[in-house]
Amino acid sequence: MITHEEHRLRSLADQGRWTELLGAYRQARAAAVAFGAPGAPAHSRAAAATAPLGHLIAYAAPPEVAARLFDPDGGPGTAADVADHDAGPLWEVLATRHSWRRLAPLLGPPPVRRLVAQTRVLLGEDLSRDAEPDREGVPLLLEPWEAPGRGEGGAAVREYLRDGGSRSALLTLPASREGLAPVELPEPGARLPGQPATRALAELAGWARAVCVRGTAPHAAARLAPGRLVTGGYLPFVLAWPALVQAGVADRAHGAAHGRLALWRVLAAMAGAGAGRPGPALRVEVGALVARMRCFTWDDPADRLRHLHLALEDPATGLSWALSGSEEV
């Protein structure tokens, strides 16, 4: 049932009265913080109560108004932050609607600025000269081996709808058995615990298992595959990249920028570079790793809707990592 208040808010949106809508958002958010259900965290109940209106403002309002969703000038408890979401994070909705040139002068909170900038990069915008350097050194332009956020490489960034909801491709690996063949895996490689890259992989996809071994990609795959005989094969990293980025989008509170940042942490750790290295140095070391890396994927008959089975081999070090998991979404 559509309430009188919802009719009023829709009418304001249809009339382009965005400043009034922003005021309504802030009032509702402050009220949710002050008078929400006992026991519920104040931020969580405020975010849930105001999410649909926040989505509408982030999607359709002029950027000068929409960016103020994250501005604390409305008073305590009235500003959204990076965790606020409806169909997806409000900052990602905003980032899909306007260029960085339009948004950069308007966005204040550093966490929001960072995620919006990374989203614009995923959508193909080159910010290497127009944005402040990323604090972890992640480049502000796509590398040649990174597929665009939309288009031939897949839809890493969700496509949002004005009245709520979103469209996104379910990026899985392998996506099908095309190009794969029966492969007999070797004995599992010797497990190497405590590797930083393994921890980073586990953080990238919390629903999957991660392991590091000494040996080739098939030696790593043998640690996590359902048996010695699998349907599998090698593929270039650029084809694995979209699924790895989406693996880091754990839920509606996370956006594709989270996935890209998490994947760069993985690759930096595999290259022995570490986070926070200056962008040019990190690009060189990670680029060299990707150029020599061998990627192996395999199929699991028990796969559910969302799945990822990938082994990454670095011939320079003789180490390989495998990431494997499956879940409903």
Image (cartoon, helix red, strand yellow):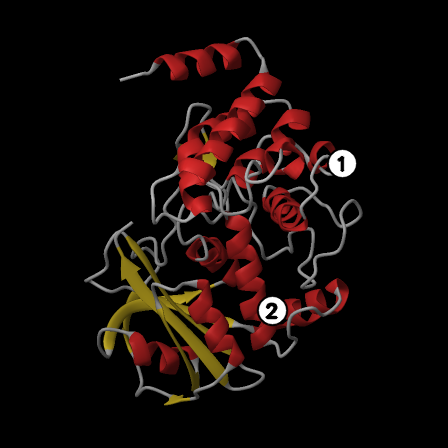
Tell me which corner region of the image, top left, top right, bottom left or bottom right, holds residue 37.
Answer: top left
Three-letter amino acid code at the position of disc 2:
Ala
Image location of residue 267, percent across then percent down: 57, 69
Q: Callout 2 environment at 10 Å: few (<14), some (14 to 19), or many (20+)?
A: few
Q: Quadrant of the N terminus?
A: top left
Image location of residue 150, percent across then percent down: 52, 40
Q: Callout 1 environment at 10 Å: few (<14), some (14 to 19), or many (20+)?
A: few
Does 16 appear above or below 79?
Answer: above
Left or right: 209, with 238 as reference point? left
Can residue 257 be seen here? The reply is yes
Pick the residue in front: 196 or 285.
196
Three-letter amino acid code at the position of disc 1:
Pro
Question: Tag 2's secondary structure?
Answer: helix
Pick the residue in front: 178 or 56.
56
Tell me which corner region of the image, top left, top right, bottom left or bottom right, holds residue 288.
Answer: bottom right
Left or right: 147, with 282 as reference point? left
Counting residues from the N terminus, which is met first, the one under dot 1 or under dot 2?
1
> Disc 1 vs disc 2: which is toward the camera?
1
Which disc number belongs to residue 105?
A: 1
Image location of residue 189, percent across then percent down: 37, 88
Does 52 appear above or below 183?
Answer: above
Q: In the image, what residue occupies the spot 39% across and 70% down? A: 323
- Label 1 to label 2, Cα distance in Å? 37 Å
Q: In the image, what residue occupies the spot 42% across and 23% down? A: 163
Can residue 86 be seen here? The reply is no
Q: Which residue is labeled 2 in the image?
A: 291
Does 145 appear above or below 225?
Answer: above
Image location of residue 210, percent across then percent down: 39, 74
